[in-house]
Structures are given as structure tokens and as C-alpha cells.
Amino acid sequence: MDQTICKACNTPGLKRFLELGDIPPVNAFLHPDELKNEKAYPLNLAYCPNCMLAQLEEIVPPEKLFEEYLHLSASSAANLSHLKEVAELLNDRFKITSETKILEIGSNDGSLLAFLKPFTAHVLGIDPAKNLIPLSKEKGVETLPIFFNAKRAEQLKNERGTFDFIIGLNVIPHTPNVVDLLKGVHTLLSPKGTLIMEGVYALETVLKGEFDTIYHEHVYTFSLYALKKTFAQAGLAIVDVERIPQQGGSLRVYAQRDEESKRESEAVTALLKHEHENGWLNPETYDNVSVKVNNYKKRLREIVDIEKKKGKLIGVGAPARGVVILNYCGLTAEDIKYIVDDTHLKHGRLTPGVAIPVKSWDALSAEKSPVFLLLSWNYKASLLPRLKERFPGSRVIIPFPELEVVKLD
Ligand SMILES: [Zn+2]
């Protein structure tokens, strides 16, 4: 694939605006004996001068990233409650009946579809991560272990017909051939059906210098302007949009088949205007990102060097975004002794690239007065009280949205 051509609209001349260096796949947590085979890939972000879609220049083949996927929907209470909200929202807004057919692309361990099952039995998941299949089966959710694309969609339509709702949370960012995926959605969507998608919103993340949503799995970062152009290529029209707080700032879009959709909502018009006014179409906006991110790296390094003298520095949460921060800022086991995380599949493994051990929260019972780096900063509201309960008065470095150190008084 030519790295200088837009992956969505095929326009040549992508403009590179952020270089994060060579980083290994951030979800590939390693057993200690796997370290020597670890591979790193360049992480450079560019935007398309035509559709303005922010995208990685170089793509790591998805099969190298997703065969064993350690992020479980059910592993975080905050994520589960988000999925429950999505299920309830769907029912409140669209009145799901026992006849409603729902397809989820990237259904992970089936958590969202399990929340929808009380409303309708007609739910189907698709997810290529084979290790997750038994987990969705336990929840009574049928899942096909395949990569979704336009060709698969044709087969699926023959076997199962069309769907009233197709859901894809954080799917577009993970799909290099995004137009092909959306064409598949078009094939499988019933004439009056609705596509609901969520993804990280560039204006609230990378364009503000929050670079930790940039990793190999995230080929694209959303803006409404770019999405509208991309969806149109597959015959889909965005009819409504909401800004939601997930992952530091995301968009939820509703789309329908172009030939069926009425006009776009006021929210769509208003957000397109907002993006225009906030420089989404100006090259200077992108040029500034690199400066912000470089300065951030220096400041975090300084803070870590100061804080690690005050107590043993322990990471809290080992999400993909945290692995990006560690790698880009060069924080290793010299700085952070270990990381605690709720995902049992990560315990006993090392973080990609910087080889920091991951343990369960039980490890903290051996500590006297540690200092923390909150890598899962987007779950601050639930994690800080847990830390405060065990270590009142302790200090926590919070990397984003503002880099700061708080004391848990
Ligand atoms: Zn483009």
C-alpha cells in the first residue's frame, strides 16, 4: 500500500504531522521469553489534503494485531456501564421490539449484545479475535470469528438477511479499508436501518496534543467532516451526531442509507461549523500538534524524575493508550517498577516496548508509600478513590487531559 495515498479517498500527497517513532503493537503484552522476538513499527500520523481524514501512514497487517486480543469489554466497570448506556439509549431512541435485528461489528466479548438481549433475541456479533469467542458464548451471544468486509457482507446477507441496526464502537479506527467496510454495512443495513458508530474525536484528542490514542490499531482518527466524506463514498449519510466523553473525547454518529435518509440534524450542521471554526481545515492546526507533543514528552520526563525520588513509582492501568505514553516518553522499568491492572490476562506479562511487569492490584498490599502514574487516566473517576482508600495522601501523576500531580487528600 502506497503510504502517501489517502486510504479512504485515494488522493495522493498525505501530509505528515506527527512522528511518534517505532513502537511495538500496544496490545501485544509479552511473556518474558517473547521479548527477543518483539517487533516495532513506525507510528507516523498524517492527514489527507482532500478529505482531511487523519490517518497512519503505515499499516501493520490487522492479523498481526488482533489474533489474540487482551482488551476485554467486561474488564472495566466503567466500560461496561458505557455499553449498558448504549443499549438503553438504543431502546429509548428507537424502541427495539422482539423482531428487531441487531448486528455488532467488533463485538469483543459480547458485552454490549448481552445488554440488548432482553429486548430482542436477534443479536449477532462479529469479531476476529478467536480467544474472545467462548466469552461471548457464555453470555448467550452468537459471534462469527471473521474480519468484516464488503464480500463477507454479501455472504452474510444471503444467510441472514438485512439488519435494522448495525453497531460499530471504535471499529472504523481499526479498519484500514474503511470504505469497503462501510459498503458492507450498506449491503447489510435494511432500507430504514441505522448504523451507529463511535470513535475517538480528533478535535478533542490529537489536535489538542493528546497523542495517546495514536497506535497501530487506530488507523483513523475521526472528525465529522472527514467521516461525512468517507461515508458518502459507501452510499451512507450521517443523519445525527453526539459528542461523548469516552476515551478522552469521542463522536457517536448515526447514519442511514443515502437514498433513504432525510436531511442531517441540526447537531450535524452545528458540529461541522464548529470544526471549520476550530481550524480542522487549516494546515497550521496540524503543524502545532508536533510542537505540543514534543513539549509534553519533556515535561512528563521531568515530573517522573522528580516524583520517583519521593517513593516507588507504580503505574495504574495498562491500557493501549498507556503503552503509547510509556514508549513515546521513554519510561521503562527503571522509572516504573510495575503496573497494576484489572485485566487478569495481562498479569505476569510485560508491557510492549518498555518491558514493565504487569501485576494484579493485590501486589499493592506489599507497598508502604508509593507514588502513582495513572496510565488509565480516562478512568480517573473510578481509579483515584480506589488508590485513596489504600494510600491516603499519596501522590498521583495524571498524564491527561492536563499533565499534573495530585495529592489524594
Ligand atoms: Zn482522503
Image: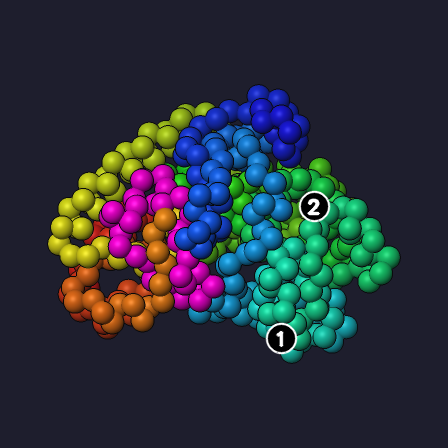
Residue underneath mark 1: 138
| Magenta residues, start to end | 326-354
- Between discs 1 and 2, the one toward the N terminus: 1
Compare residues 32 and 254 and report the one nearer the observer.
Answer: 32
Which quadrant of the figure has residue 19?
A: top left
- Is residue 69 rendered magenta in the image? no
Q: How is the image coloured?
A: rainbow
Alpha carbons under labels 1 and 2: distance apart: 28 Å
Residue underneath mark 2: 181
Give the image location of residue 45, x and y in percent. 48, 33
Asked if 409 appears above or below 120 in the picture, the reply is: above
Give, as a three-letter code, the residue at label 2.
Leu
The residue under the point 52% across, 63% down is 72
Give, as a three-letter code, the residue at label 1.
Glu
The residue under the point 44% across, 28% down is 17
Residue at far left of view: 310
Give the image location of residue 382, x and y in percent. 35, 67
**Viewer can see residue 50:** no
